[in-house]
Amino acid sequence: MVEAILFVLMAISAIAGAVTVVVARNAVYSAMGLLGTLFSVAVIYVVQLAHLVAAVQVIVYAGAVLTLFLFVIMLIGVDKSESRDEALPHQRAIVGGIAGAMVLLVGGVTVFGDFDWVPAGSTINANATNGTVEAVAAPLFTDWVLAFEATALLLTIAAAGAIALAHHRRRPS
Amino acid sequence: MIDPGWYMGLAAVLFMIGALGLLLRRNALVMFMCIELMLNAVNLTLISAGRALNDLNGQVAVFFILVVAAAEVVVGLAIIVSVFRLRATASVDELSELRG
Amino acid sequence: MTELIWLAIAVPLAGSVLLHFFGRFLKEPLPGVIASLAVGASFVIALTAAIPFFEGGAHGEAVLLWEWMPAIGANIEILWDPLAAMMTLIVTGVGALIHVFAIGYMHGDERFHRFFAILNLFIASMLILVLAGNYAMLFLGWELVGLCSYLLIGFWFRRHSAAAAAKKAFIVNRIGDLGLMVGLMLVFTAFGTLSYAGIFDRADAELTTGLATAIALLFFVGVVGKSAQIPLYVWLPDAMEGPTPVSALIHAATMVTAGVYLIARSAAIYELAPAAQVTVATVGAFTALWAATIAMGQRDIKRVLAYSTISQLGYMILAVGTTAYVAGLFHLMTHAFFKALLFLGAGSVIHAMNGEQDMYKMGGLFKKMKVTGITMGIATIAIAGIPPLGGFWSKDEILAAVFERGGYFSFLWVIGLVTALITGFYMARQFILVFLGKPRWDEGVQPHESPRVMTVPLVILALLSTIGGLTNTPIRLSLEHFLEPAFESITLAHPPEETWLLVVIAALSVIAGLVGIGAASVNYLRPREDWERWEGGLEPVWSWWGQAYGVDEFYGRTIVAPGKRLAEVTAFDIDIPVIDGAVNGVGRLVRGLGAWIRPLQTGYVRNYGALLLAGTVVILIWLLVGGA
């Protein structure tokens, strides 16, 4: 019951945020829309008992990535507004087509789809997927430790790369 | 609990909105945000599927995706800043030299 | 010595290669001397190897040199029998004399060594032809002599007319060669081999009359080309563009006689094809008459001799067509002597007259060129068939054999007789116009006798023309006995047995020749205006003869022009638009396709993204709808 209400509320807010991202003329408004979506999704994660992931989502995604976005928006120019007309020919047409196809796809799958989301005969065990820190850390440091280390390396490289990219070439004078 | 299909549906909708936004906006930053939207939709799908199948690996996967997305944003924004320094524009339509 | 007969081919061949590569380092006249010695060596080798045949009774021997294509009986093998020996001796003997003559004639030419290289190559090729032990090797020699003929006719290739004449010779010969090739294929299908050994003995058993006739006629097509009979004789007059030694050697004494040799060699096949025999004899007789009439109206000293050659070849073909093989070969030999002599003499005259070849601008040369004059006079008498010189014995034997054959052949005999009259006429006309009468030279021409290197061969040939006929008189048929082993199983046509008939026929041909000579003398010993008026009075016939009945022009209109038109159509209307168009069209198509697709690369990331997404959606739909 509670879950259903929460779902509906969060769904609405997530979609509202997403639409804002796409539609808003000002880039800052788009960032705010994204923030709304991120928070809504984080709540849904909590409902799904993915506590660690929800926390990381808020701290990293909403707290770091989005902040980074806002920094760059400010850097690049917040006063510029994008015009509404489409410069590229046929773009709107193709996109319309894709949108229609996607809607059909999703609609079709939903209405006519014959899926068992939950395998027949089994029940959802709340404890099995309780995403506490210990629960998630266990597979992370045993089964997936290689991937873990790799992503650590990835983060380092990304940071180094960003520095290299943004480096001001000082002319020898 | 409710049918996991609803969560998947929400994720699908979010993904669609993100994809369409990617194609319709010119501002590089907004396009990037749409990409983040799409990644979030995927995360949502994974968590829901993990819950439906009693598998914790869903959450582990999401963890990784979060990390990679963060790294990707760092580098991507650095690129956007560099391009802005060269061209004084954030519109991807201006960057069209590689044409046939 | 028989095993070493291959040296007869190898020595001139080696000489040719040597002169080709190193000739330019040798000063005149060394290349000519080397070449002449090479041919002389071949002559000596052949003579030595032929001794068993002179003694009589020896049969032919086959000498296998190399297994080339044993499966079809085409090896490099030599058949050394009296026929081959006779041909070899004629080729190398007369060839050596002509080589010596050429040392003087080609003096000063910048490609002196190259001339002798090709001349030696020709001797080698001709020997390959006559010494061959199978048809494949014969064909090899056949084509090689055609090649050498081309090279030598066009020796002064910077002259357009010479280059054109060389091409004409080769192409017309090729037409004949087609017949020969098909004939060889037929022989192979009938016998399973091309080797003489496997054919002539079995000819009687394996060949039906029809098949034998077909083969014989196809061979004859080749002969018509190579030995310049109607209708493929047109190349020979043009071949006079080549240096005179070439005309003497190739287009008088040797190459053109290859056709006669071929028929003689294939006698076993012709035996079984009476229809072919009649065809061959008829073509020979008519060619003899046709060419003789043309010779009457010629002004160029070499052209008269060219048409004369065609005419005399007609006699030889008539002979072998009547199965009088020995008579035909006999005439081949005597003709080689006096025709070579005539050509070399003409060369001597041309040399003395600084290149002038128009007889109307000669005259009165006898005083200045005694040796040339006397020798050419001897040759003229010989060719007209006046005893006791060579031409009489051989020509008379032919005519007698044809007469004896009877029936249809009597008609051919009459043609031969008329031709003898005309032969006497045009040869006497030539001699008188060149050597007698008042000089009609241009300004600045100072005729002189040629150097000894040129006159000595003339004298030798004159000697041979005189006594050569004595090799086969009815009193002592030496040549026939010599050639007997080669024609063992063949029925030869013979002159009549009755002596009185022989005498009558002989007398008729002699009278015909004398009448011709007399008519020419009476006419041309008069002042110039008189005989020019006489010639004018014979119009339009005289022009017909002078223009060779317009045959070349006729061929040009009916064959050459359509051929050129066909080539033009094929090249410009088919090859360029259609084939090139198709190939280029493919290129244009690709480029067009590329240009059509290229706009897809707009350079806009959003377009690319849209397409990516569209594709993904399509795949998704397909996967869900039921694809694999």
Image (cartoon, coloured by chain):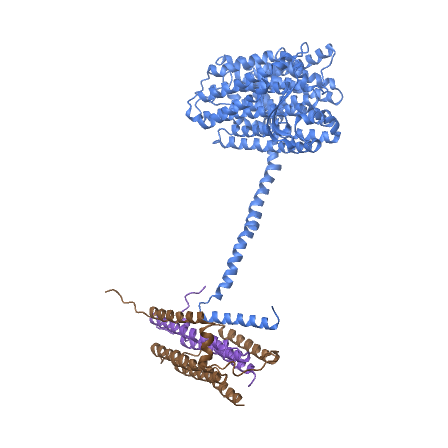
Q: Position of residue C305 (x, y in %)?
A: 57, 22
Q: Position of residue A17 (x, y in %)?
A: 45, 83
The correct choice, above or below, for A33 with respect to C506 in the image is below
Chain B colour?
purple
Q: Is residue C3 visible?
A: yes
The residue closer to the viewer here, C294 or B71, is B71
Q: Is residue C366 visible?
A: no
Q: Which chain is blue?
A: C
Q: Position of residue C594 (x, y in %)?
A: 50, 60
Q: Which chain is brown?
A: A
Please state, as top left, top right, bottom left or bottom right, where the N terminus of chain C lies in the image. Answer: top right
Query: Could you say which quadrant of the image residue A113 lies in?
Result: bottom right
* C396 sits to left or right of A42: right
Query: Could you say which quadrant of the image residue A34 lies in?
Result: bottom left
Q: Residue at x 53, y 28 (%)?
A: C153
The residue closer to the viewer here, C612 or C145, is C612
Please state, as top left, top right, bottom left or bottom right, where the C terminus of chain C lies in the image. Answer: bottom right
The residue closer to the viewer here, C79 or C313, is C79
